[in-house]
Image: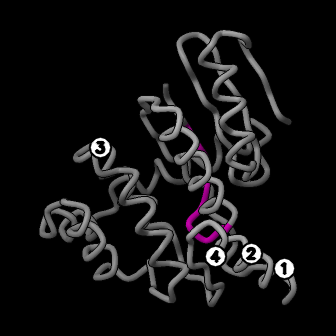
Amino acid sequence: MRVVFWSDFNCPYSYIGLNRLSKAIDELDLECEWEMMAFELPLQHNFTASQIREIEEIGKSEGLSIHLSELTSSRDAHRLVKFTKENCPESLLELIFKIYEANFSYRDISNHDVLIDISIKCGLDGNAVKNFLLTKKYKVEVEVDTEEAVFNAITSVPHYIVQSDAHQLIIPGAFEKEDFKIALEDLTSGEITEKSFL
């Protein structure tokens, strides 16, 4: 199974959705290859105070600590994801989760030291990551990810494309874990050949 998903580290629903989907996949004991596509959001959120409380409560109920504070650029974090996908793919999902965790715990994910610290905890070579972040590698690829999303009429995140053999699911949004599980079971059983929750 392969999951391609557009998201941004500044989107709390992307964090919640990925947590739910990854748990659904684990509980179904499915092998999965992950690929994160960048969808950079504006550096300000428009959540009301009640929406922020709701997001924080949803996160807490799922074991996630989410604190919405001042947002910082996610560009280098997205570049680091692509670097990890190429150089240490077995650590990719762990790295993605740790970047989300840091960002919603008042850490500045535009700071290279923060990204290097996360990388080391995920088993990457700190010096290699430091040298990489000083370059502009994957900058264009990050920009193309967002352009591709717009071209494909993806206007919000998270947005998932789940592929199994010749079948695929298109799932926009942070579905409940049980809904993800039902959809994945249908996909892997061959009961559906293509399904969209649009």
Image point (72%, 53%), residue name: 174
Which numbered disc, 3 or 1, marks the residue closer to the eye? 1
Q: Give me the residue at 66% from left, 35% from top.
A: 181
Q: Are marks 3 and 2 in contact (CB under 8 Å)?
A: no
Span shown in magenta:
4-12
Query: Between tags 4 and 1, which lies in front?
Result: 4
Place of residue 16 in the rendered image (x, y in percent of width and height, measured from the top left):
64, 61
Three-letter code, disc 2 = Ile
Whether label 3 touches label 1, CB < 8 Å: no
The part of the image, by quadrant, that contains residue 184 is: top right
Dot 3 or dot 2, earlier in sequence: 2
Relative vertical location of residue 18 with respect to residue 59 in this rendering, above or below? above
- Callout 3 amino acid: Pro
Spatial separation of the CA atoms under disc 3 and disc 1:
35 Å
Which amino acid lies under the numbered mark 1 shown in the image of this protein?
Gln
Could you tell which of marks 4 and 3 lies nearer the N-terminus? Answer: 4
Mark 3 to mark 2: distance in Å?
A: 30 Å
Vertical comparison of 122 with 55: above or below: above
Give the labeled residue for mark 3: 89
Q: Which residue is mark 1?
A: 51
N-terminal label among 3 and 1: 1
